[in-house]
Structures are given as structure tokens and as C-alpha cells.
Image (cartoon, rainbow, N blue to C red):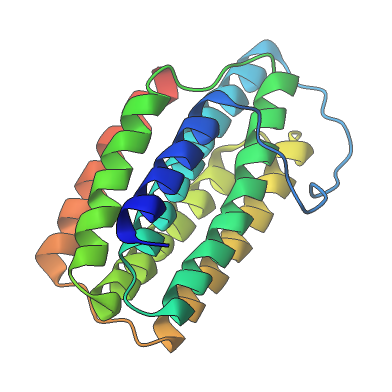
Amino acid sequence: MNALDSLLIALDRGRRTVLAESVATRARPKAAPAELSEDERRLSGALMRVNHVGEICAQALYQAQAVTARSPALRAQMAHAARDEVDHLAWTEQRLAELGDRPSRLNPLWYAGAFGIGLLAGRAGDAWSLGFVVETERQVEQHLAGHLDRLPAADLPSRAIVAQMKADEARHADEAQAAGAAVVPAPLRGLMRAAAKVMTTTAHYL
């Protein structure tokens, strides 16, 4: 398979990520049904929409970095991580529906932007690509920890999903670190945090 074929496959996966229903390969984390007030339901819906957007972006990043990976081992590692993120995508999608809420209207934009960033990271070389994964996943892990603090205590289904996502993201970061990740410079880490803040703030409402 040449680079063009890989890119076309990645773009088709992007289309399905944004437009089609996601199907998990792992069972969703179990929790008792939640009895939420209207305000709690709206808060949970907004937070789970942000998490769903994060999984849209994760698909884009991993697909783009798999396309640009130099080594087959790294390509396989990116593909494996992307499969975990599909589970997250399906779980957050299901939870949004249960909460009577909707995904972000800007998902095509989020996917396109993240795919472009992933291509740039991948083109910089495998070590830098892995470093980008480490930094991204560490920031996502912190973001999910914040959501566990903010989600209503009674919303056990959402909390169970977010807790499993947080554990998976930490594992992805550890695996990328062990594979030889370069350290992302501080200015770039700050830029990544700023971009993520724009995305999460916008997705909370849109």
C-alpha cells in the first residue's frame, strides 16, 4: 500500500468517524442508572459532548500519524491506540443520547484540524510523533480528571466512562514514552494547551 492509498483510507475513516455511528469492541464500563436533575443533566451533556469531541480529534490524530509513521511497529501502535479511542467515541456517543443531548455541530471542523496537526507531527519523524502522543495524552488525562471533579456525583454512568477513558489515555502515553518519544518543547506544549482550551470551551456549547 502506497502513501496515497493510506491517506485515502484515513480520509474514508474520517468520514465514517464524523458521520456514522461508532461501534465499540469492548463492553462499556458498567454503572447504576442515574437520576439527575435538569441542571445536572445539562452539565453532564455538555461535558460528555466535550469528551466526544476529544475522541473525534483522537481518531484524526492517530489516523494521520499512522499514515506518516516511518516504521511498521509505530504504525501498528497508532492503529491499536485508535481502536481504543473508537471505544471511547462509541461510549460517549451512547451516553450523549441517554442524556438527551447531541454531539458538537463542529465535528467535521474538529476532525479536519486535528488530522492536519497529526500529519505535521508525523512528518517531523517517529520520535517527535511519539512525543506529541505523550504530551497530548497527558493533557487529556488532566482534562478528564477535571471532568471527574465536575460531573454530578449521581451521574455514575458518565463517571465510569470518563474513568476508563482516563486510564486508557495514561496507558497510551506510557506506551508512547516507552517506544522512544522525544520531549516536546515547552512553548509547543503551551500552544497545545491553548488550542485544547479553545476546543473544549467551544464544544461545551456547540
Q: Residue at x 64, y 30 (%)?
A: 93
Q: Name the quarter where the N terminus is drawn.
A: bottom left
Q: Residue furthest left?
A: 187
> What count of labels does the image hold?
0
Residue 104 against residue 58 in the figure, above or below:
above
Image quadrant in which you'd find residue 157: top right
Q: Is residue 17 left or right of residue 131?
A: right
Observer-nearest of 75 and 151: 75
Q: Position of residue 176 (x, y in %)?
A: 43, 77
Residue 130 against residue 58 in the figure, above or below:
below
Q: Position of residue 86 (x, y in %)?
A: 61, 47
Answer whether residue 47 is visible to the viewer in this image: no
Image quadrant in which you'd find residue 200: top left
Residue 123 against residue 48 in the figure, above or below:
below
Q: Name the quarter where the C terminus is drawn.
A: top left
Q: Residue at x 23, y 43 (%)?
A: 195
Q: Position of residue 181 (x, y in %)?
A: 32, 81
Q: Position of residue 22 (x, y in %)?
A: 66, 35
Q: Is residue 32 left or right of residue 103?
A: right
Q: Residue furthest front?
A: 1
Residue 22 against residue 142 in the figure, above or below:
above
Observer-nearest of 181 and 146: 181
Observer-nearest of 24 and 66: 66
Q: Is residue 12 left or right of residue 34?
A: left
Q: Is residue 33 left or right of residue 138?
A: right
Q: Residue at x 17, y 69 (%)?
A: 124
Answer whether residue 127 is visible to the viewer in this image: yes
